[in-house]
Amino acid sequence: MALDAGLVGRSYPPSAVYEVGREKIAEFATALADPDPVYRDPAAARAAGHPDVIAPPTFAIVLSLGAGNVVVDDPDVGIDYSRVVHGEQRFTHHRPIRVGDRLVATATIDAVKTVAGNDMLTTRVDLVTEDGEPVCTTRSMLVARGTA
Amino acid sequence: MSARPVDVQVGTELPEQTSRVTRADLIRYAGASGDLNVIHWNERVAREVGLPDVIAHGMLTAGLAARAVTSWAGDPGAVVDYHVRFSRPVVVPDDDAGAELTVRGRVAALLEDGRVRVDLTVTSGGEKVLSLARAVVALS
């Protein structure tokens, strides 16, 4: 079934606050085999001009995945997750994510289209601090193969 | 922290980066990212859905590719935009060598405010695995 174009613009309630942990950033950097001290050592982060340790540019996927699930689970979207592959991903950083950030994620459906029998769903997730400071915008395009 | 690049022009090449991705790396990334999709660790299920074998998380590939940019830029916080499109899975065999991933990059455009656009070419086994991989880096 092709995705309903009327879904574009649908927004979901904001997530619970996610507090960015020091060990979580280090764990993520280690999973990318990235030894950069700016992900682990506050002094190195300060030397680079940051108030504390920052996260790798793709760290926001941790929050984006969780926030995007509300879209995939929406019965009106009705996407068959067993046929889903990740088509495209974009991160726009308003500033680096850093240790201690208390972030709220809000998901919005940005685009739906059907190409060659595949449904494509683009979800935007806006990550802002609980005080409302924009930190990162992620866009994820999922492809459901052969579902349209 | 490494030094920031100087004399950057269109065509400036980034140091080539080669990584290996093993099954253990997939498990580590699954835990760190929270992406527990079975096709990244279970060969039986991967084959059932028509894949040749277990494949790497797209975002692991993208994250490894971004490392080529952050280490060149000298400060990972300088990456203000990163955009990837996945075109081919990175198949990770059940052996100690895993899959090889090669990342090449070049400066494709000089933008306003000291920003540059870096285009990456990411290959595994000689095949491009990202049809688009582009970072905007604030160099000053």
Image (cartoon, rainbow, N blue to C red):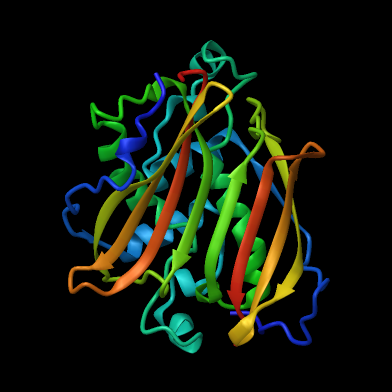
Image quadrant assignment for residue B8: bottom right
- Indicate left or right for B62 with A16 as reference: right
Measured along the vertical axis of the image, is residue B9 above or below residue A88?
below
Give the residue drawn at x 67%, y 44%.
B130
| Residue B103 position within the rendered picture, expressed as x and y whole percent measured from the top left | 73, 54
Image quadrant assignment for residue B7: bottom right
Return the residue nearer the eye: B25 or B58: B58
Measured along the vertical axis of the image, is residue B140 above or below residue B42?
below
| Residue B30 position within the rendered picture, expressed as x and y whole percent measured from the top left | 43, 39
Residue A110 seen by the camera: yes
Give the residue drawn at x 32%, y 59%.
A126
In which quadrant is the N terminus of chain A drawn?
A: top left
Image quadrant assignment for residue B115: bottom right
Return the residue nearer the eye: B12 or A38: B12
Measured along the vertical axis of the image, is residue A37 above or below residue B26?
below
Give the residue drawn at x 65%, y 35%.
B90
